[in-house]
Amino acid sequence: MGARLGETAKGRVEIKGLNKSFGETHVLRDVDLTIEDGEFLTVLGPSGCGKSTLMRLIAGLDHQDSGTIAIGGRNVDALRPDERDIAMVFQSYALYPHLSVADNLALPLRMRWLSARERLPLMRWVLPSTRTTEAAIAKRVREVAEQLQIEALLPRKPAQLSGGQKQRVAVGRAMVREPRVFLMDEPLSNLDAELRVHMRAEIAQLHRALGVTFIYVTHDQAEAMTMSTRVVVMMEGKPIQVAAPEAIYADPVDLRVARFVGSPRINTLPGRVTDRGSIALGEIELPFAGSVSAGEAVTVTIRPSATVASIDASKRGLTGTLTHRENLGSDLFLYVRLDGFDAPIIVRDDPAEIGAFPIGGKLRVKISPERMLVFDQSGQRLRPRAPASALA
């Protein structure tokens, strides 16, 4: 018990060649991933991409078909979940309804520090050694409760708690064991929107305070972008890109990543490389000094914030018709059906300009070449050899 209380755990997680199938369904495909000690890594992806399966394999709740997992430099493939020195926080909280908050927090320590005989109700207070251990457990529970500011909740039962309070207790139950790694599987999905924003900040602050490895699974890009040291975007059972949140947003390497990250969704338009090396996009050409063959079809993507709308017909740009407006107070989003294109694009503008853009009116949309992202037919990023300059 004493060694466990003072132990400094290392939480580096190394995943090599991980594969997992359920029947004929291949869920994970040759996953290689390293999570450094103390970092906050978020596994982001749509439903069915394999992110929760990856979490369960790290925890030992399922076993991989092939590949290895190491935690703190030790291979854990043959270890049970309770031997891996990890702690999980579930979206369902998984609190015992008949136990008080204090007993829910204490339970992991009692299971680890007391024998089955010592956990019997009478024995817990008869044996001197058990009383000493219980005192140490109570001290640790108080420390965690103070850190999470839930001391007043210790006597309550889970039914007497709000969603946010239950979430704090679930995190506290993971904290008491001082694990090497925290695994969080969509822990905020059951909370309302306002509380999710608040709990995002709390979890990020908790990570900074503890300095322990956090692996966080979510399909919510706002959670990934606001809390993480790095984000791994999963698609079809494989990590597509692993990078800092700002790089995932601004510098995606795959079209699927560009489409998945960002709200509103990134605009995508079909283009073609000209003999001059520029990209023909409808009625305009955009400079692009990339290693790409003339005549090749490409996909041009542009964030709504990198477009400018104007009702001035003399302006250079793509011509279109305004079909819808969304005024969010801080932002105005214009939905424009471009002439010659199937899908509309979204332009971000100043809400104060809403009167200048009537529904059904014609307008011009200018695209900033230096901010466009270009992808080949397989969805891989094409990079220019030199920065593009805007057309006059």
Image: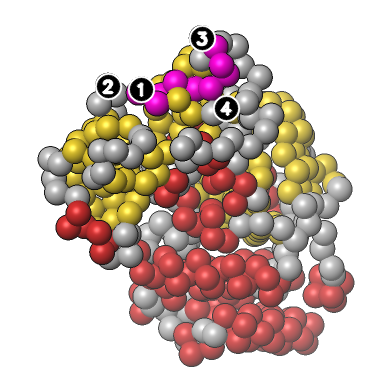
Instruction: Quadrant for residue 233, please give it.
Output: top right
- Seen in the picture, residue 12 relative to 282 is either above or below; the reply is below
* Residue at image mark 1: 282
Q: CA distance from mark 2 to mark 3?
A: 19 Å
* Residue type of the residue flagged with mark 4: Phe
**First in residue order: circle 2 vs circle 1:** 1
Residue 296 is inside the magenta segment: no
- Can you say whether 15 is above or below 118 in the image? above
> Which mark, by number, is residue 288?
4
- How much space separates mark 1 and mark 4, taking CA atoms? 15 Å
Instruction: Choose top left, top right, bottom left or bottom right for residue 126.
Output: bottom right
Callout 1: 10 Å neighbours few (<14), some, many (20+)?
some
230 displayed left or right of 326: right
Q: What range of the chain is rendered magenta?
A: 275-284
Q: Residues within 10 Å of mark 3 (few under 14, many from 20)?
A: some
Q: Identify the residue position indicated by label 3 in the image.
A: 295
